[in-house]
Image (tube, grey):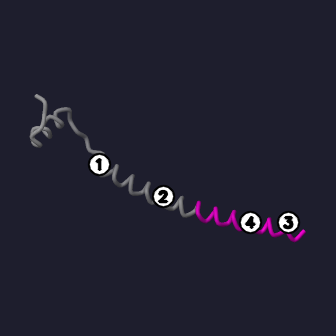
């Protein structure tokens, strides 16, 4: 019976550790998503079709 209880205790300790790691991971995902949303909000500008051509000219590259 003591061996069984020891296994249950070990299992419970592993479950607690896994839940802590999961909480840390989810916090990191939430932080990443917040940064991603901020980036997307800053970079969601409208561009026109000729913007690429103009940018290539300014950079000294382009095909045309």
Which portion, as a residue range, is magenta?
A: 1-22
Q: In the visual, does 25 lie left or right of 56?
A: right
Q: Residue furthest front?
A: 3
What residue would you read off at disc 3? Answer: 4
Q: Residue at x 80, y 65 (%)?
A: 8
Location of mark 1 (residue): 43
Identify the residue shown where x is 87% and y is 71%. 2
**Quadrant location of the N terminus?**
bottom right
Q: Of helix, strand and loop, which one carries label 2? A: helix
Horizontal arrangement in the rendering, residue 60 relative to residue 24 (left or right): left
Residues at marks 4 and 3, CA–CA distance in whole angstroms:
12 Å
Residue 24 drawn at (x, y percent): 54, 64
Pointer 2 residue: 30
Q: Earlier in the sequence, mark 1 or mark 4?
A: 4
Task: Please tell me whether mark 3 sits on a helix, a strand or a loop.
Answer: helix
Q: Which residue is mark 4?
A: 12
Q: Earlier in the sequence, mark 4 or mark 3?
A: 3
The stretch drawn in magenta includes residue 17 = yes
- Side of 53 where 4 appears, left or right: right
Q: CA distance from mark 1 to mark 4?
A: 46 Å
* Cβ atoms under marks 2 and 3 closer than 8 Å: no
Q: Earlier in the sequence, mark 2 or mark 4?
A: 4
Local crowd at mark 1 within 10 Å, few (<14), some, or many (≥20)? Answer: few
């Amino acid at each position: 019976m003591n061996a069984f209880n020891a296994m249950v205790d070990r299992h419970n300790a592993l479950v607690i550790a896994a839940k802590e790691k999961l909480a840390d991971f989810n916090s990191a995902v939430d932080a990443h998503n917040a940064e991603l949303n901020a980036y997307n909000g800053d970079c969601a500008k409208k561009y026109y079709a000729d913007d690429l051509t103009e940018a290539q000219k300014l950079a000294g590259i382009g095909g045309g």
